[in-house]
């Protein structure tokens, strides 16, 4: 049987699951010759790249994308032995990636370059090993910039909603026959069902959809064909600094769509503005907010999205605007919207036997927390919010905004449980805790509590949760959070059937 798409002269094109199937079919000791075109990064021609921190969301997406192109990939990660990353390791190894310990010994002499992210510190053993072997060290953003420059790229940026809109544009353009590729910041449920990690895909056209993260400012290196900017709010950096990054990205892009409903984005130049504001040239005719979905009507077409919340209406506007620019409109697009499966850990709802809705959400800044709580109101009048802040620097920077947000969105009879700050390692000043947020709330009408650990959280939830409640679990970066959600569901009688 052929694996991949046959070409002339006995050659095959391998993409996505083809790579998985290839390594399933061959046995140990079999010689497999793959001859990809090299990845050109600056003046360096790369056929083999080592990723330090390969289990990171952005790094794993790049690693998979390059594997799909036939580039040899190896990688290390400090979470190599963790049960929470076992599935990702298995998936990467299934693609032919060599996964090794992060002690420098796995930095391959045959690699053409080593890729690192901002999270990798100078003291990492892999860096010393790479330098000793004369291996070029490139930043994740420089690798992504090179990929973006090599394709007809659509970059999706904004403080909130990037992963969802990236997934929307990818799925919608795929349904319209555009066959795009994908490099995303979160797994798509539709791709997970195909046995992939879900945050990367290799399509058959020159189109590439990329999530452009603003957290370290590196998106100013990107020169995409098109860009969509969703919103601006305080997150890893201040609003003014983030706005400056987005202004540069707009300048770098050949075409840019900006959200007209965001007052900061209205000050930036744009090829087209979308939204409900009078300044928008792309506007919906009518919209409806339903308990578990939203509807948008435009030019006689109903777009029914099976996701709740006003923030998902905002996401849908941006995605539809971009898709229209690339010739994807009408009934086919409406069908893709109706069957959109969403992104992992973006308001994933499970109803338990005891009648409690448990929601797993990636919300990790004040704006995203507010949006998640607002969407949860569609499932229940009473919210039990569970939040795990991540990073001491980020928590210190956002402390006052967290306090203001929780005061604003939580009501009488709601509850708030804060877990200890998630520490991902590295050099950091641990001079703040979750207690600083709860203490800063002062007198409030809802119950607010810091828990020492997850066992104490479980005790509180088991005592408090009752039928009709919504337990909203929020947080980022920690790969064990999905396991926490599963444990909560099990404790409340398991998932309800039917």
Image (tube, grey):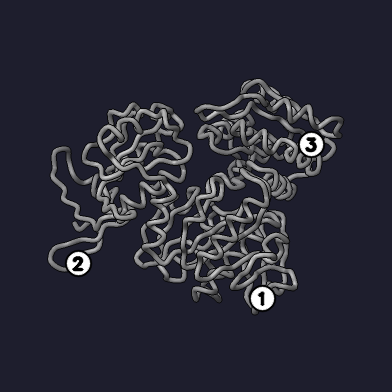
Q: Residue at x 42, y 55 (%)?
A: 145
**Camera-nearest label, 2 or 3:** 2
For marks 2 and 3 on the same chain, the one whose residue lies earlier in the sequence: 2
Tell me the distance, in whole angstroms, between the alpha carbons under discs 1 and 3: 40 Å
> Tag on residue 87?
none
- On the question of residue 47 being in view, the answer is yes
> Tag on residue 414?
3
Q: Which residue is mark 2?
A: 7
Q: Which residue is mark 1?
A: 281
Residue 5, placed above or below residue 61: below
Q: Residues within 10 Å of mark 1 (few under 14, many from 20)?
A: some
- Of the 4 image quadrants, the one containing the N terminus is bottom left
Q: Secondary structure at mark 1?
A: loop
Q: Residue at x 78, y 40 (%)?
A: 404
**Camera-nearest label, 1 or 2:** 1
Q: Secondary structure at mark 3?
A: loop
Q: Position of residue 496 (x, y in %)?
A: 60, 40
Tell me the distance, in whole angstroms, between the alpha carbons under discs 1 and 2: 45 Å
Q: Using the rendered view, name the quadrant where residue 286 is placed.
A: bottom right
Q: Secondary structure at mark 2?
A: loop
């Amino acid at each position: 049987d052929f694996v991949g798409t046959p070409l002339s002269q006995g050659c095959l094109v391998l993409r996505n699951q083809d790579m998985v199937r290839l390594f399933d079919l061959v046995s140990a000791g079999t010689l497999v010759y793959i001859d990809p075109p090299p990845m050109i990064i600056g003046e360096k021609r790369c056929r083999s790249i080592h990723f330090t921190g390969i289990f990171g969301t952005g790094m794993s997406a790049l690693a998979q994308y390059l594997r799909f192109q036939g580039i040899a990939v190896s990688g290390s990660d400090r979470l190599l032995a963790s049960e929470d990353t076992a599935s990702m390791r298995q998936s990467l190894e299934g693609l032919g990636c060599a996964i090794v310990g992060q002690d420098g010994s796995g930095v391959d002499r045959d690699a053409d370059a080593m890729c690192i992210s901002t999270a990798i510190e100078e003291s990492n053993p892999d860096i010393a090993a790479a330098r000793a072997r004369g291996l070029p060290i490139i930043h994740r953003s420089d690798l992504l910039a090179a990929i973006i420059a090599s394709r007809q790229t659509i970059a999706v940026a904004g403080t909130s909603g990037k992963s969802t809109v990236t997934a929307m544009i990818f799925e919608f353009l795929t349904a319209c026959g555009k066959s795009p590729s994908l490099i995303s910041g979160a797994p798509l449920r539709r791709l997970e069902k195909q046995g992939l990690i879900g945050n990367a895909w290799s399509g058959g056209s020159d189109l590439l959809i990329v999530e452009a993260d603003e957290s370290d400012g590196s998106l100013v290196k990107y020169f995409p064909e098109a860009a969509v900017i969703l919103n601006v709010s305080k997150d890893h950096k201040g609003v003014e600094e983030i706005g400056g990054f987005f202004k540069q990205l707009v300048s770098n892009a050949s075409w840019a769509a900006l959200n007209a409903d965001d007052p900061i984005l209205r000050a930036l130049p744009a090829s087209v503005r979308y939204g409900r504001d009078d300044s928008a040239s792309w506007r919906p005719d009518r919209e409806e907010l339903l308990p578990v979905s939203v509807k948008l009507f435009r030019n006689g077409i109903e777009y029914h999205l099976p996701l709740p919340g006003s923030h998902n209406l905002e996401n849908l506007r941006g995605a539809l605007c971009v898709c229209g620019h690339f010739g994807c409109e009408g009934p086919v697009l409406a069908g893709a919207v109706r069957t959109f499966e969403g992104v992992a850990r973006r308001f994933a709802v499970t109803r338990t036997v005891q009648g409690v809705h448990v929601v797993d959400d990636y919300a990790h800044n004040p704006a995203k927390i507010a949006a998640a709580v607002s969407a949860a109101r569609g499932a229940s009048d009473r919210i039990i919010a569970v939040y795990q802040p991540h990073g001491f620097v980020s928590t210190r920077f956002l402390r006052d905004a967290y306090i203001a947000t929780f005061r604003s969105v939580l009501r009488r009879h709601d509850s708030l449980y804060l877990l200890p700050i998630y520490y991902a390692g590295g050099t950091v000043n641990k001079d703040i805790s979750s207690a600083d947020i709860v203490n800063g709330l002062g007198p409030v009408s809802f119950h607010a509590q810091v828990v020492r650990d997850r066992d104490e959280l479980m005790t509180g939830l088991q005592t408090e949760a009752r039928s009709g409640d919504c337990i909203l679990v929020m947080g980022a970066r920690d790969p064990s959070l999905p396991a926490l959600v599963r444990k909560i569901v099990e404790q409340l009688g398991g998932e309800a059937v039917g």
